[in-house]
Image (cartoon, helix red, strand yellow):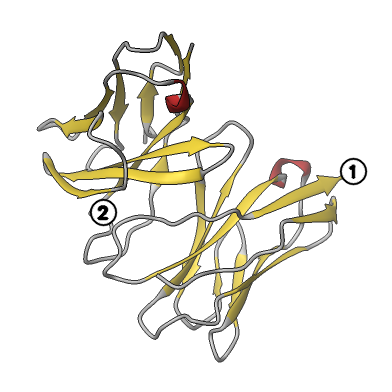
Amino acid sequence: KAGVTQTPRYLIKTRGQQVTLSCSPISGHRSVSWYQQTPGQGLQFLFEYFSETQRNKGNFPGRFSGRQFSNSRSEMNVSTLELGDSALYLCASSLLGFTGGLAEAFFGQGTRLTVV
Amino acid sequence: DAKTTQPTSMDCAEGRAANLPCNHSTISGNEYVYWYRQIHSQGPQYIIHGLKNNETNEMASLIITEDRKSSTLILPHATLRDTAVYYCIVRGNSGYALNFGKGTSLLVTP
């Protein structure tokens, strides 16, 4: 079956702009999580969506937001971009998510965002 | 979730077994040990997980000590494509995210 698809793969934006990243999970998976990866901080949890509801959120400013659609596809948005937002943004799909249970997560290839 | 400690880097010759250790001395009874890996510029890949029994799948084996304070991921016949950062993660049912930490950078050499 098809894996997790993230678009676009690469993106270059200017400081102050906003950006929207997209993630299509594995068919049948209802949970989508987002992670930010930078060389200095490693992989950090942004938020998780399950059945169109944000279930958990990491320690990121309000400029980072997301949503999930009825078909489980998810988008994340970063407004007022800063140089420090340059990172690899990864989406993970799982059947039920982690809250209250166990599930292995399947990651996409990520979107490489560069802010100049 | 319990904290894990892994060596920063390891080398392994191609065709040999790669044994990656992980210490998790504060693990509690309901916490599982997960292993993921990340090949350069790709998303992390799930490898295996276990609670207290040893586990094996087509990718690797997971050996958990009887006191559950440490574990070892074994790649039985390492190939060059196994060169990656390997993350040992301990989490229980109440967690909602994966805490990846720094991981072990494994280099498989010809």
Residue that badge 1 annotates:
B110
* Image location (x, y in percent) of residue A18: 29, 14
Query: For the point 49% across and 37% down, which residue is it?
Result: A37
Query: For the point 48% across and 83% down, which residue is it?
Result: B52
In this rendering, does residue A30 appear at all? no
Q: Which of A1 and A9 is in front in this view?
A: A9
The image quadrant where one finds the N terminus of chain A is: top left
* Image location (x, y in percent) of residue A48: 25, 45
Query: For the point 39% across and 16% down, which residue is it?
Result: A8
- Asked which secondary structure carries label 1, the reply is loop
Q: Are marks 2 and 1 on the same chain?
A: no
Crowding at dot 1, Cα within 10 Å, few <14 / some 14-19 / many 20+, comes out as: few
Query: Horizontal placement of A12 versus A94: left or right?
Result: right
**Quarter of the figure with residue A35:** top left
Q: Nearer the viewer, residue A1 or B75?
A: B75
- Asked which secondary structure carries label 2, the reply is loop
* Image location (x, y in percent) of residue B97: 34, 55
Above/below status of B9 relative to B65: above
Above/below status of A103 relative to B90: above
Identify the subunit bearing mark 1: B
**Quarter of the figure with residue A54:** top left
Separation of residues labelled 2 and 1 (CA atoms): 39 Å
Of badges 2 and 1, nearer the viewer stands 2
Q: Do the residues labelled 2 and 1 touch (CB within 8 Å)?
A: no
Q: Residue B48 carries which label?
A: none
Which amino acid type corresponds to the residue marked 1 in the rendered image? Pro
Query: For the point 30% across and 28% down, which residue is it?
Result: A23
Q: Residue A97 carries which label?
A: 2
